[in-house]
Image (tube, rainbow, N blue to C red):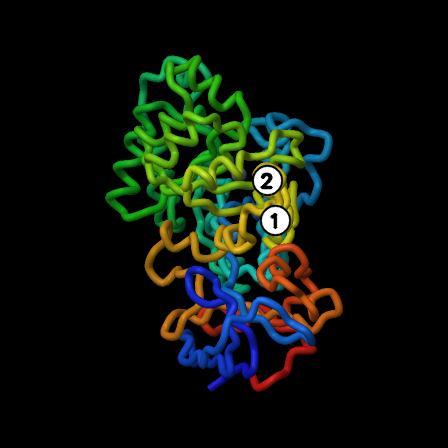
Amino acid sequence: MPEIRDCIVLHGPELTPLRCARFAWQQDTITAMELGAPCTRLDSGGLVIMPGLTNAHTHMGDSALPDGATGLTLEQGFFRPAGYKYRELAKLTEETHLPHLVAHLRYMARTGTVRHLDFREQGPYGATLLRKAAHATGVDSVILGQFNGVPFTEAELRANQIGFRAADRAELEALLAVADGFSESTMNDLTDAAWRELRAITTAQGKLRAIHCLENAGYRDVSLATTGRGDLIRAIELYDPHIIVHLTVADAAEISLLVRSGKTGVLNPRANANLGLPLPPIAALMSAGANLLLGTDNGMLNSPSMLAELDFTYKVAKSQFGDSLAPEPGAILKMATSNIHAVLGGDNYGYLSAGLPADFVVLDFNQPHLRATRNLTASVVTRVTPEDVLATFRQGRELWRDPRFVTAL
Ligand SMILES: [Zn+2]
């Protein structure tokens, strides 16, 4: 039975750092954790085991175009039909595209991520391509597919009367045969009738629903002009999504609406900043009690490293809270770990306990910048770099291991 001795484990949904004499797993399950005293500081280093991270919002399709959106607005870079992303994706063959996906999923594993929720473009073909990359790497790709093209004309969207046609339903059926759920760029890309139908179809099939809302004021403004209501309230009432991504410009009423709905918000502060958008109201959302996750968003905008996202988010949140006390670093780390369970349920715990899936990451706290930490959780959130990740396991399968890490495996 593989095991790691004399380590520190971030234990349970609260991620409490505890001494651990022996951490063992067999096949896909953690079989033993011999836990000891709390351990928030180190004097001479050690191994730290944390839950495998969840990146709750990616578009790994455009990881083939790193920094390709530099100098482009959100609309120029990312909106259908003519945005740079969609034009460039259409030029790629499977042979040229798949290696980029595989390489970036491997980079995720190398930076401690075991699972990502991907808003995959290109219809059924795009979902199938990512599924192949997930199989090749062992990273869990939760695939939320979208239509290859916008099913409606501008005039049809403005009139907001008609629903899907037979061809749209056929594409949706083919998409959901491969994907774990549905996502769309904005509420303004489909009609109200189409959103209602999507909700019914995905509910009947037990699929996930996701949407971008309030990434900039345009999302709300276009929705108001077309339907008389903002995009967040329409999303919640018509489509009932499991996750709502961005909320960058959410105002107090919208934050309150999100919390009352019980929906999970996914924040992407590095992507928002990179597009020159406002930073999401992290402190206000946390204070209101929202369940929050983090994502790195487009491969074009960011490396898919949750270590970088955690660091940035923690510091932005502290600045927004306006004092040096809030938030606890553990509250930020939960956004990449245990907060996922409320969304995915099942075996997707996002935390470590005996009997749960062996989804974990081994961190090298013997490194000079970590070995004398005075707040272990803060150091995980702000100081761990990709080079400090010794190994990443999902369901007991080794997704990444540094050759330095030999131990008792
Ligand atoms: Zn996105």
Q: Nearer the viewer, residue 208 or 375?
A: 375
The residue positioned 54% from the left and 52% from the top of the image is 328
Looking at the rendering, which quadrant does residue 244 occupy?
Answer: top left
Which residue lies under the disc numbered 1? 309
Choose top left, top right, bottom left or bottom right for residue 197.
top left
At mark 1, the secondary structure is: helix
Which one is in front, 334 or 243?
A: 334
Q: Amino acid at mark 2?
A: Pro
Q: Is residue 357 left or right of residue 312?
A: left
Distance of label 2 from label 1 (alpha carbons): 8 Å
Residue 20's disc number = none
Element on which disc 2 rests: helix
Mark 2 neighbour density, 10 Å: few (under 14) some (14–19) many (20 or more): many
Tell me which amino acid carries mark 1.
Answer: Glu
Which residue is located at x 37 percent, y 40 percent? 263
Q: Image height check: is 108 above or below 355?
A: above
- Quadrant where the C terminus sits is bottom right
Horizontal and vertical percent position of residue 122: 50, 40
Q: Position of residue 145 (x, y in %)?
A: 44, 43
Asked whether residue 237 is in view, the answer is: yes
